[in-house]
Amino acid sequence: SAGVKRLLMVAEPMAAAIGVGLPVETPVGSMVIDIGGGTTNVAVIALSGIVCDASIRTGGDELDQAIVQYMRKTYSLLVGEPTAERIKIRLGSTVPLLPEEELDVKGRDLVSGLPKIVRIDSAGVRDAIQEPISRIVNAVRRALEMTPPELASDILEHGIVLTGGGLPGMYADSQIGPGLYLALGSSLAQSGCLLWLLHERVAWASMQKRSW
């Protein structure tokens, strides 16, 4: 009834690249990181195809679960996933913040069973989510290791596009390789979708990736 006569399936990273306006049909290499709730997909795209990719079963939901377990073990406080997501958005980071931020969190005391309020800081949350964040960074590194040198040079020049709602609002500055950084900013919390990741501190040539 909608008049659709032909339906084509498109990989999520390719759809994201087309949606943001990347030149997917050209020989210029583009990298897209799609961080969803349950999975993270990384793809290098050129000439209307995916040149290399990596996928892991780690996403925003696992970050939320890591925060839930952190609250249980550290504060004996039971919180739900919506509260954990709010903590992730407000305090989530992978590098020290200046100053470190704090947040009052409400939950149920596991000892007394009564409602309880505790104050937590961004340093503790950062330690709690370090393991899933490391898996995401390693997936990006694996994709870069498989990328041809010419396309790696394009990525170094033009940056990376981040899509998906798995890391809303988080501050990150994770080193993927020598001189290559993955930088996230809080603007993602407002845009909810896309952010250009510019490699402002890249000082290494693309061929340097062979030493990773």
Image (tube, helix red, strand yellow):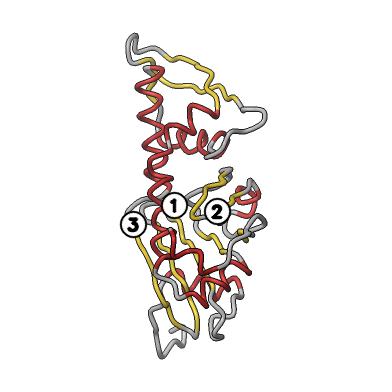
**The furthest residue to the top:** 112
Q: Earlier in the sequence, mark 1 or mark 3?
A: 3
Residue 133 picture quarter = top left
Dot 2 or dot 3: first in sequence order is 3
Please name the residue that numbered disc 2 is placed on.
Answer: 182
Residue 205 location, x and y as percent?
58, 66
Residue at the disc numbered 1: 137
Crowding near pointer 1: few (<14 within 10 Å), some, many (20+)?
A: some
The mark that comes first in sequence, 2 or 1, is: 1
Image height check: is 117 above or below 146?
A: above
Q: Give the secondary structure at mark 1.
A: helix
> What secondary structure is found at the residue carrying circle 2?
strand
Q: Position of residue 159 (x, y in %)?
A: 60, 65
Q: The residue under label 2 is which amino acid type?
A: Leu
> What residue would you read off at disc 3?
56
20 relative to 143 in the view: left or right: right
Give x and y (percent) for residue 15: 48, 73
| Foreground label between 1 and 3 | 1
What is the three-letter code of the residue carrying label 1? Val
Residue at point 43%, 84% (across, down):
1
Q: CA distance from mark 1 to mark 3?
A: 11 Å
The residue carrying pointer 3 sits among few (fewer than 14), some (14 to 19) or many (20 or more) residues within 10 Å by Cα, namely some
**CA gap, disc 2 and disc 3:** 17 Å
Residue 76 point in image, percent of width and height: 37, 17
